Amino acid sequence: MTLTPTVKRLLAVTASLAMALSLAACGTAKTGEEAPGHRITLTITADKGWDENSTPAIVHIKGLDEDNASVDFYHAVKADKDGNKGTSKTMP
């Protein structure tokens, strides 16, 4: 499936808006302080054609039970230089 340039731009804008909204909702820690939480390492492997110039993959992380129901965020993962793989470390 080949995406047209218009669809690619629409996906990029949607991804950018989702990321901006999620970052705005998270707030920030003071310089030099680490925010409380757990670190997450995301590794994504895609089909051929996903490279460092492609739109990032958007991952939705959501808690599934009452112990982690407050976990609900999106995170963008960019492809690495070699392509078809991307790794990102985040803290919700």
Image (spheres, grey):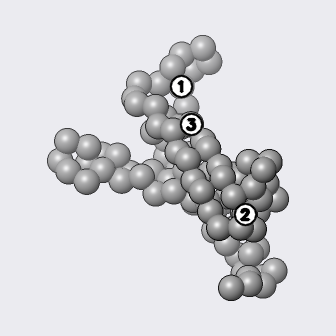
Looking at the picture, how far across and down is residue 61, in whole percent? Answer: 42, 52
Asked whether, in this view, residue 83 is left or right of residue 67, the answer is right
- Residue 15 shown left or right of residue 73 in the figure: right
* Residue type indicated by callout 3: Lys
Mark 2 to mark 1 CA distance (whole Å): 33 Å
User: In the picture shown, does residue 10 fall above or below 2?
Assistant: above
Disc 1 and disc 3 in contact, CB within 8 angstroms: no
- The picture quadrant where one finds residue 48 is bottom right
Nearest to N terminus: mark 3 or mark 2: 2
Q: Secondary structure at mark 2?
A: loop
Q: CA distance from mark 3 to mark 2?
A: 19 Å
Residue beneath disc 2:
50
Residue 84 position, x and y percent, is 69, 58
Q: Given the image, on which type of amino acid does mark 1 rest? A: Ala
Residue placed under numbered mark 3 in the picture:
89
Q: Which residue is label 1 attached to? A: 29
Position of the C terminus, as image quadrant, is top left
